[in-house]
């Protein structure tokens, strides 16, 4: 498929020499990756990064570093146009297990999030819009304990969309959702990323098809071998060969990309690469 015209501007997220270890166990080693503001003529085009890796490799640990909830053992995470070191609360983070306040109804959980960014009237309007968009309006007065797993997950995504500025991290956003709801979440991610030039969504997922279709770049977190000895190095990293630019490959921003043979071929290759790790 033909690559759509695009260019790159300022960095919006930078990981510089980021490593993380717990005690003597190295989880992440020397991560050096960057998300640049992608520019498309005539469109507000945000960024979507898909993050893959085998179970237990360190994706959720990476999310906590990106969200400023933990400090890396070495290196820095910088966010936004100003490229300031990340602080907790700057990045919206929908965790693999989605925390809502159990003593508040769904409606109040969302209002609380929306009021961190908007005045009360705007917060109410936005909350109502997300509730209906996510098929949650009928459940607005329920407490989190009385929602289904998928409903809680949609609520958590809506909550972070309502309160974060430009950067949002979704850890496994499609797991436990039925096909129609996956489509809703996909549409919403596209909507979020075309709403503002700087909006950036990072998606950690094992659903490679769905995530690749949404993304303009991919990172594969994996252990590497020492080039000299062939020995596996401790911890996982994102090597240059595991950074895929989908915009250049002509696989980004096509609405029905999943039906294209090039896309199917690329996803098959990627899965093979992950299996072989
Ligand atoms: N606070 C901690 N202390 C010690 N080890 C930890 C801590 N947090 C995570 N780990 C370890 O870090 C490794 C990576 O865990 P992580 O949750 O990031 O995996 P993941 O890639 O998200 O896996 P999955 O796809 O199953 O969600 C695991 O071996 C885990 O036990
Ligand atoms: Mg995880």
Image (cartoon, rainbow, N blue to C red):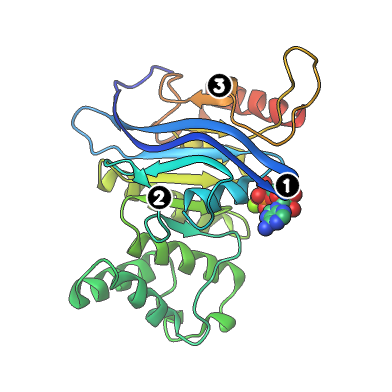
Q: Nearer the viewer, mark 2 or mark 1?
A: 2
x, y percent for residue 49: 47, 38
Query: Mark 3 or mark 2, which is nearer the start of the sequence?
Result: 2
* Left or right of residue 238, residue 2 in this image: left
> Residue 141 lies in what quarter of the image?
bottom left
Q: Which mark is residue 56?
A: 1
> Residue 84 lies in what quarter of the image?
top left
The residue carrying mark 2 is 86
Q: Residues within 10 Å of mark 1 (few under 14, many from 20)?
A: few
x, y percent for residue 75: 51, 38
* Residue for point 26% across, 66% down: 117
The Cα atoms of the two marked residues, 2 and 3, are separated by 23 Å
CB contact under 8 Å: marks 2 and 1? no
Query: Mark 1 or mark 2, which is nearer the start of the sequence?
Result: 1
The Cα atoms of the two marked residues, 1 and 3, are separated by 21 Å
View extreme (top): residue: 228
Tell me: residue 61, above or below residue 261: below
Does the Cβ of the disc 1 residue fall within 8 Å of ligand 1? yes
Tell me: residue 230, above or below residue 161: above
Q: Which mark is residue 240?
A: 3
* Left or right of residue 246, residue 81 in this image: left
x, y percent for residue 37: 31, 33
Does the Cβ of the disc 2 residue fall within 8 Å of ligand 1? no
* Residue for point 23% across, 39% down: 44
Q: Is residue 126 visible?
A: yes
Q: Quadrant of the N terminus?
A: top left
Q: Quadrant of the C terminus?
A: top right
Q: Is residue 206 visible?
A: no
Count of numbered badges drawn on the protein = 3
Q: Residues within 10 Å of mark 3 (few under 14, many from 20)?
A: few
């Amino acid at each position: 498929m033909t690559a759509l015209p695009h260019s790159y501007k300022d960095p919006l997220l930078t990981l510089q020499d980021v490593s993380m270890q717990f005690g003597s166990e190295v989880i992440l080693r020397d991560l050096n990756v960057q998300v640049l503001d992608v520019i498309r003529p005539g469109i507000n085009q945000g960024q979507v990064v898909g993050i893959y890796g085998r179970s237990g490799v360190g994706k959720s640990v990476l999310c906590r570093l990106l969200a400023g909830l933990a400090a890396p053992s070495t290196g820095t995470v910088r966010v936004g146009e100003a490229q300031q070191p990340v602080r907790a609360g700057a990045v919206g983070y929908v965790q693999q297990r989605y925390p809502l306040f159990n003593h508040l109804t769904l409606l109040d959980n969302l209002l609380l999030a929306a009021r961190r960014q908007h005045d009360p009237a705007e917060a109410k309007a936005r909350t109502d819009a997300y509730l209906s968009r996510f098929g949650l309006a009928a459940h607005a007065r329920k407490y989190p304990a009385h929602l289904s797993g998928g409903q809680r997950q949609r609520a958590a995504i809506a909550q972070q969309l309502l309160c974060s500025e430009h950067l949002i991290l979704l850890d496994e956003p499609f797991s436990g959702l039925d096909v129609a709801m996956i489509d809703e979440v996909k549409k919403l991610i596209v909507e979020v990323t075309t709403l503002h030039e700087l909006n950036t969504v990072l998606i950690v997922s094992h659903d490679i098809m769905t995530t690749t279709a949404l993304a303009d770049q991919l990172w594969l977190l994996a252990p590497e071998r020492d080039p000299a000895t062939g020995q596996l190095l401790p911890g996982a990293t994102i090597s240059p060969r595991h950074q895929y630019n989908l915009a250049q490959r002509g696989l980004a921003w096509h609405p029905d990309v999943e039906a294209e043979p090039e896309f199917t071929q690329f996803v098959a290759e990627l899965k093979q690469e992950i299996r072989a790790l």
